[in-house]
């Protein structure tokens, strides 16, 4: 995990949530830079307001997001890791740039027992190629029964929701839809 | 390909133009190695955001600074954006 060197005032975090509300921006498109201190604190603040009934959330994925533990960071094998936010494997092959092909992702989640586990999942179908193609998305959703995938400890849950996290992963395309 | 074109005035100063047809996804969070002073020459509805701060609107003749190695980004507006950049 990267060190969070720049600090953010709690008022700025609240302003960030207000910014989303006043501009009608989904919470999944956090105004702060992905994986910055503001990003994590934004989700903690949004969930706090949501739980207290102070934040009205209508977008179905945003509601789902508020039921996760996104924003929280926990210890996993001696390392601080974020919960419920997909991360992309660093490209380990040197001097061999690849475009497209299989991408590998992982996410840390808590299971039913409260233990933190690492869930690996892949985008074997080429996110960039298909994410902007409504037909391909529809086909993927139907084939993988995305609306039935509710268990976040399973790779299928995350593979189906990849477009929601496209911006956080530094991928173009994506948005508020299943594949 | 970069989402802008540059026209140099001298070694440390140049005019940068962002076309209004660019894709918002091209305006990514990034850092620069040197401090920069920015002056907006033309643009409507564009916003600027530093890391861990709220975006703010930049208008014609807006001036602001970007410290070296601080993440920042532009948010696309309604027109093309033309800015003058001076590295210090």
Image: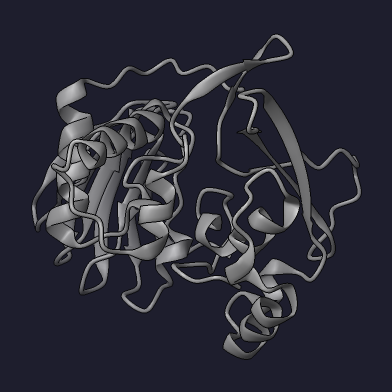
Give residue B63's quadrant in the image. top left
Closest to the observer: A9 or A84? A84
Tell me residue A79's x, y (percent).
67, 14
Q: Is residue A63 above or below residue A9?
A: below
Is residue A166 found left or right of A157 in the rendered image? Answer: left
Is residue A143 found left or right of A16 in the rendered image? Answer: right
Is residue A89 found left or right of A59 in the rendered image? Answer: right
Is residue A8 found left or right of A68 in the rendered image? Answer: left
Closest to the observer: A49 or A129? A49
Residue in the picture at 35% in, 40% down: A32
Which residue extends farthest bottom? A135
From where the camera sits, is residue B8 visible? no
Residue in the picture at 32% in, 52% down: B74
Give residue A33's quadrant in the image. top left
Tell me residue A158's x, y (percent).
65, 54
Residue in the picture at 14% in, 67% down: B44
């Amino acid at each position: 995990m990267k060190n969070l060197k720049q600090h953010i005032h709690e008022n700025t975090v609240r302003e960030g949530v207000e910014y989303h509300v006043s501009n009608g921006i989904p919470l999944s498109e956090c105004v702060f830079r992905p994986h910055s201190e503001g990003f994590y604190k934004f989700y903690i603040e949004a969930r706090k307001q949501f739980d207290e009934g102070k934040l009205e959330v209508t977008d179905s994925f945003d509601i789902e997001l508020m039921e996760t533990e996104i924003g929280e960071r926990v210890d996993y094998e001696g390392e601080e890791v974020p919960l419920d936010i997909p991360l992309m494997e660093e490209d380990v092959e040197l001097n061999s740039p690849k475009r497209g092909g299989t991408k590998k992702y992982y996410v840390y989640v808590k299971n039913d027992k409260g233990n933190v586990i690492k869930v690996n999942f892949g985008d074997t179908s080429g996110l960039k190629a298909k994410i902007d193609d409504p037909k391909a998305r529809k086909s993927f959703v139907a084939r993988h029964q995305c609306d039935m995938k509710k268990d976040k400890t399973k790779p299928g849950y995350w593979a189906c929701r990849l477009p929601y996290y496209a911006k956080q992963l530094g991928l173009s395309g994506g948005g508020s839809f299943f594949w | 390909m970069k989402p802008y074109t540059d026209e140099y005035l001298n070694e440390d100063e140049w005019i940068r133009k962002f076309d209004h047809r660019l894709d918002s996804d091209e305006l990514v969070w990034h850092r620069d190695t040197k401090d920069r002073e920015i002056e907006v020459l033309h643009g409507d509805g564009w916003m600027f955001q530093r890391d861990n701060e709220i975006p703010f609107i930049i208008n014609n003749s807006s001036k602001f600074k970007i410290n070296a190695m601080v993440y920042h980004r532009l948010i696309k507006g309604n027109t093309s954006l033309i800015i003058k950049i001076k590295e210090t």
